[in-house]
Image (tube, coloured by chain):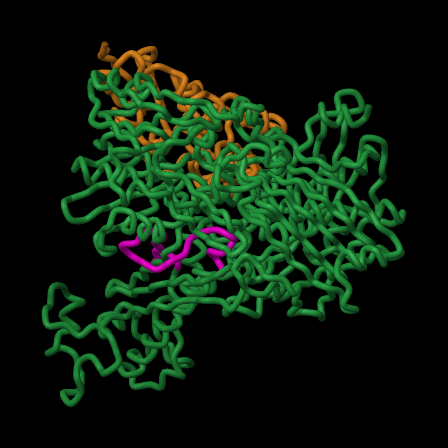
Amino acid sequence: MTTRLFGEPVQRREDPRLLTGQGRYLDDLGADALAVAFVRSPHAHARVRDIDVTAALDVEGLVAVYTWEDLPERVGRPLPLLIPHPALTHGRTAYPLAREIVRHVGEPVVMVVAADRYLAEDACALIEVDYEPLKPVVGLEEAAHGARLVHEDVPGNVGAHLVQEVTSVAGLSAPEAVEAAPHRLSFRLDIERSASMPLEGRGVLARWDGSDLRVYSSTQTSTSVRMAIAAALGLPLPHVEVIAPDVGGGFGVKIVHPWPEEILVPWAAMLLGREIKWTEDRREHFVSSAHERGQVQHVTVGFDDEGRVLGLDVSILHDHGAYTPYGIIVPIITSTQLLGPYRIGAYRVEFSAIYTNTVQVTPYRGAGRPQGVFCMERTMDKIARYLGKDRTEVRAVNFIGPDEFPYDQKMTFQDGRPLIYDSGDYPEMLRMLKELIGWDDFRRAPGRGIGIGCYVEGTGVGPYEGGHVQVTSDGRVHVSTGLTSQGQGHETVFAQIAATELGVPIERVSVVTGDTRRFGYAVGTFASRAAVMSGNAIALACRKVREKALRIAADALEADPADLEIADGLVRVLGAPSASIPLSTVAVLANPLRYAFDDEAARATQFAAAASPDRPPVAEGDEPGLEGRDYYSPIRSTFASGMHAAIVETDPDTAEIRVVRYAVVHDCGRLINPMIVEGQIHGGVAQGIGGALYERMVYDGHGQLLNASFMDFLMPYATEIPHVETAHLETPSPLNPLGIKGAGEAGVIPVSAVIASAIEDAEGIEIDRMPISPSELFELRQ
Amino acid sequence: MEHEITLVVNGGVRRVRVPGRRLLSDCLRHDLGLTGTHVGCEHGVCGCCTVLLDGLPVRSCLTFAVTVDGHEITTVEGLAGPDGLSPVQRAFAECHGLQCGFCTPGFLCTVTALLRDNPAPTDDEVREGISGNLCRCTGYQNITKAVHRAAELLAEET
């Protein structure tokens, strides 16, 4: 009778295979496939004068070598600009293989296919590319000066420039409101680059059978990869299938598509008539995938004696790397989500997306929010410091009240829709956080400080997701949805939703994600949207199935559908539990058959069923089978929120920074599986601590990434991450049937702000750049 | 030049011809089809490729297959017993010690050896013991919890 599973910490259904080595990640597939390796540019900016492949031709096992010249017109075009925007006046994307100019170290120049990866790399080593080095553009401010250009036809290296403004109630612009305010502060903030850095890199496997193409990709969106491949290769969509197998982490980088390899590998598989695979290695991931976070922000704020923000004027330089395939989503999110849980008098924000000769910038978990939250929370701390007030008090006077929802921030969000918060309770959340961390009792001491950070996260962006639910005659429930999974436990949470909605034991439910053979319409897994979008779509599809099951069962039981319930896989008459019919039988009855291929089928043939001879076996408007499909398409995003606090200790001699306690209060609406939500928060916080204290991409003046390995790019181990204490507030979203908001990115968002706040408190030194290393803190002390 | 080597993998004798430069990780994954051992960096930092070599955890991406000729190797595929998942595997499931699962085989091998040598580790010993393995998903909290839980399960069994 335990079919009410929504909200329970159900153990994950993915785990048995992943714990026994039976997972199927990209490189675990295609045992007999040919291997691909790439010659990648060693220069940040250069003209390709000549490519000499002669020496490589003698490598045993070599199958093919391709340069841009070898690509057909359609394949050799620049990669698509996925998310156009009117402000992105100078969007630029790369060619799948470099054509004439390379614009960052790591850009693919030559593709080699060989019997295995060792041999393919042997051949790569023998290919000579003659480069004419050009002066690289490195460093955000240098690039913004525009003395040298990344793209000859992009003046000032400015890909996009966008201004959004909200005037005060009195009609003042932000600069006017700042000017009129009793107090003013101006300052500059810096955030450096980090990257998603999933432990499994990208990878593509393609198989062509003469008419159909099957592609496996370690992607966050198989449906859109499929459409992109069909478009680039000129194939009819029904002849292309894309499957995301088990994916070893994504964190944003795998939402970008099509990657050059996602076009080139299938193209070569068709050309050669062989199964072909490319598996990204770690250095390739560092220099040829994507990074994020790098921004310089100039802030001017005006406020009153209580700390109320009357005007806020923010100007952002956003480092976009060499290309803009994913549009300007990241700086748009920074600009809009900067507002957090606050009611700001007048707000003006402008950003310039600047090209540099570095790896392209696309969303990494948080997607611009960590930078925006860093900006706003540093601002709040500075106001508190200026006024001599407690930092939580200043935040509290600026909070949007719990009775003010829906709250319109009067901005345009990343989905092009109004930035209207659906629900939340920020004062209560702050109260919970202060209690959890012991804010009021904290005893400050030299080298010991406490910090806080608050955020609001637009989650569950559209346009839509769908779900398909089929009950088969063995009583099993097969759920599929198009978006993909990278460790979020979708097989478990979607099964919880289906089991709850349909009243079946979860053991009978199976879930497939990211396989276009099963579900062709989807957007993808990003923006903390999977639970909101597919969760609701699956619930709606289940409700259709349930309605049909009750109708068929009512006929069979000669009852009114309103008097029926489904529990434990049985449709029962309420109050008369002996009058029941298994869902498996309902599935049999739902599909009138001519042929009796097994015992169940025999019960549904035309001669066995007790159907009326006066009606067609399948009624008009009805369909055979007990299945349902539905879509969820929200009017706008949901808005999750959270507040974090940390206690840090700094070493008086070495300036080492230790996070002693870390507390999180989190509101993602109704929880489907608290165990999984907490896991998402823990992992997000760990990535945030990495970004606050350890991780950065170090480019030299030549555009060389100096730390492109795990030896030098320092991701935290267990020894660096504190125990994370969590508490949940649940303000259901009024926008969707399940009242959920999404949790995937939450943990990472405010961490840099929180750690900066705590270090500042411990040291009495303003912290305006993140990440911060012990040596940087040491220098700040001097 | 190719070499014929003999490995005892998960209790079974396997003969395989490999070039001298073949990494043990590639030999296990591509020559023997044991794809449970994962490769996350190929420079010995992430620990995804950790296997047990004569019972000791090693980086299979930093080991040439020819150098372990005649030795015993346990991979994640060999951790479960005839009765199902090992206590370490069960504890990881129970404590939600994995998300994407890519680093998990390395952690399982590391923790199996850790608890064999130190059946009741302190929290610091657990963190130190797993500090050679990177995880990008979990933040380690539930992995740490899982190690303690595995220690309990192992103690119950003996």
- Residue A354 in sight in this render: yes
Is residue A712 depicted above or below B152 in this figure?
Answer: above
The spot of residue A165 in percent (x, y) is 68, 60
Please state, as top left, top right, bottom left or bottom right, where the N terminus of chain A lies in the image: bottom left
Residue found 18% across the figure and 35% down from its top: A272
Q: Nearer the viewer, residue B1 or A387?
A: A387
Point out residue A604 in the picture as x, y percentages from the top left corner.
17, 73
Of A55 and B42, the residue lying toward us: A55
| Residue drawn at x 30%, y 61% as measured from the top left | A476
Give, as a single range, the part of the protein colored magenta. A506-532
> Residue shown at 77%/49% (left/top)?
A300
* Figure label count: 0
Quick one: which chain is green?
Answer: A
Q: Quadrant of residue A41?
A: top left
Most foreground residue, B92 or A291: A291
Q: Tell me which chain appears orange.
A: B
Task: Determine whether, in the image, residue A713 is placed left or right of residue A181.
Answer: left
Q: Position of residue B3 (x, y in %)?
A: 23, 11
Q: Quadrant of the C terminus of chain A?
A: top right
- Whether residue A286 is in magenta: the answer is no
Whether the magenta-drawn stretch holds residue A521 is answered as: yes
Q: Quadrant of residue A748?
A: top right
> At 57% across and 59% down in the image, what residue appears?
A413
Q: Is residue A586 left or right of residue B125?
A: left
In the image, residue A152 lies at what x, y percent? 48, 37
Q: Is residue B99 visible?
A: no
In the displayed structure image, the side of residue A611 where residue A284 appears, left or right? right
Direction bottom: furthest residue: A614
**On screen, residue A515 above or below A474:** above
**Is A137 above or below relative to A463?**
above
